[in-house]
Amino acid sequence: MTSRVLMESPENLHGPAVGVGQDATPTTVDVDTAVFLLGAGVTTLTHPLLYVKLLIQVGHEPLPPTVGTTMFGRRVLYLPGFFSYAQHIVKVDGKRGLLRGLSPRIVSSAISTVVRSKVKQQVDVLFKNGEQQNSLRKVVKETSHEMIIQCLSRVATHPFHVMSVRCMAQFVGREVKYGGMLSCMVKIFKEEGVAGFYVGLIPHVLGEVLFLWCCNLLAHFINTYAVDESLSQASAVRSYTKFVMGIAVSVLTYPFMLVADLMVVNNCGLAAGLPPLSPVFSSWLHCWNHLSNKGHLFRGSSFFFRRVPLTSIED
């Protein structure tokens, strides 16, 4: 702001000087735009990771496993990691193939930014309370607010998640059923109605709600009862607790996300959601039980050092 004032001519320094400070104050629209642009950039950069992850989740393994050894010298079979899988996609579809299904995700990111911003404003107004609260009540209140925001955001963006997942899943059977977003909307609505846009919503929401509560409560209890005030780095430790808990809890809630994505492609006409690659599931609980019995509840949770499941070796 100082450099801008210096560039003003002397005759303009009296009146417009007030406007300089006003212009420098970021508005809600400016903040939302910045968040959207940042989100779109991150979404684009991370999309290949999520693309490969989805293909692994649906059980598509186009490359043979390789023989390797563990730290203890035991020979095991390793499935291809992210880089090998990504190279295979590029070989089949070219570099642009890594961006299959990206457009719906960017739209989803934009809608999520707007919904979160608007809902947060309303929630803060509705639940504004001047009462004195202990730390646990404060955590519960804040987590409840986050849960409301997350659930409404998920409901608003889930249709685009469905479109993105199905576009990516077409790689398995080389289908062209789902093209642009408009054609995706028309196709899903004609075949499945409005309900088609919300397949897999329940396990997705359950996973996100469990993640929020477990992460926030565990971080609170650890910071309150496990971190000693006498430690010189107590404040620094507390600042990282929630981050570490987020990583740990995300592993535990991963099966919900896996089931949600499998239900999106289940029996939708794509090879990824039909036998022999996948059975037709009657509900998300049926899908969960099937994966649990096969020992596949964490399929796709790792990009590297993926071992061949024991059930696959036995078969």
Image: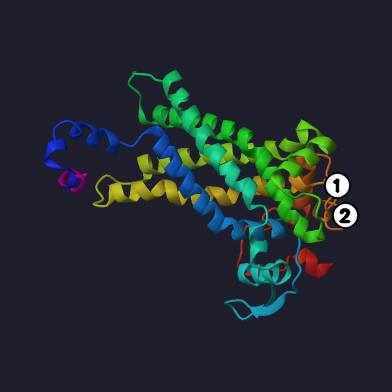
Classify mark 2: residues with Cα within 10 Å, few (<14), some (14-19) or many (20+).
few
Q: Which residue is mark 2?
A: 275
Residue under the image location 28 percent in, 38 percent down: 24
In the image: residue 283, left or right of residue 146? right
Q: Whole-percent x and y of residue 153? A: 57, 34
x, y percentage for residue 297?
70, 53
User: Which amino acid type is marked by label 1?
Assistant: Val
Whole-percent x, y for residue 66 in the image: 70, 78
Residue 284 in picture, x, y percent from top left = 76, 41
Q: Which quarter of the rendered picture does the C terminus lie within?
A: bottom right
Residue at the far left in the pictured view: 10
Asked whether the residues under the numbered discs 2 and 1 touch, taking CB atoms below 8 Å apart as contact, a structural biologist would say yes
Tell me which corner region of the image, top left, top right, bottom left or bottom right, holds residue 295. bottom right
| Residue receiving disc 1 | 280
Q: Which mark is residue 27?
A: none
32 vs 139, nearest the viewer: 32
Answer few, some or many: residues within 10 Å of disc 1's Cα (few below 14, many 20 plus, some between 14 and 19).
Answer: some
Screen quadrant of the N terminus: top left
Q: Which residues, given as a range, are shown in magenta? A: 1-6
Residue located at (78% from left, 60% from top): 172
Q: In the rendered structure, which amino acid carries the disc numbered 2?
A: Pro
Task: Give the left or right position of residue 270, taking residue 155 as reference.
Answer: right
Q: For the point 50% across and 53% down, which residue is it?
A: 41
SS for callout 2:
loop
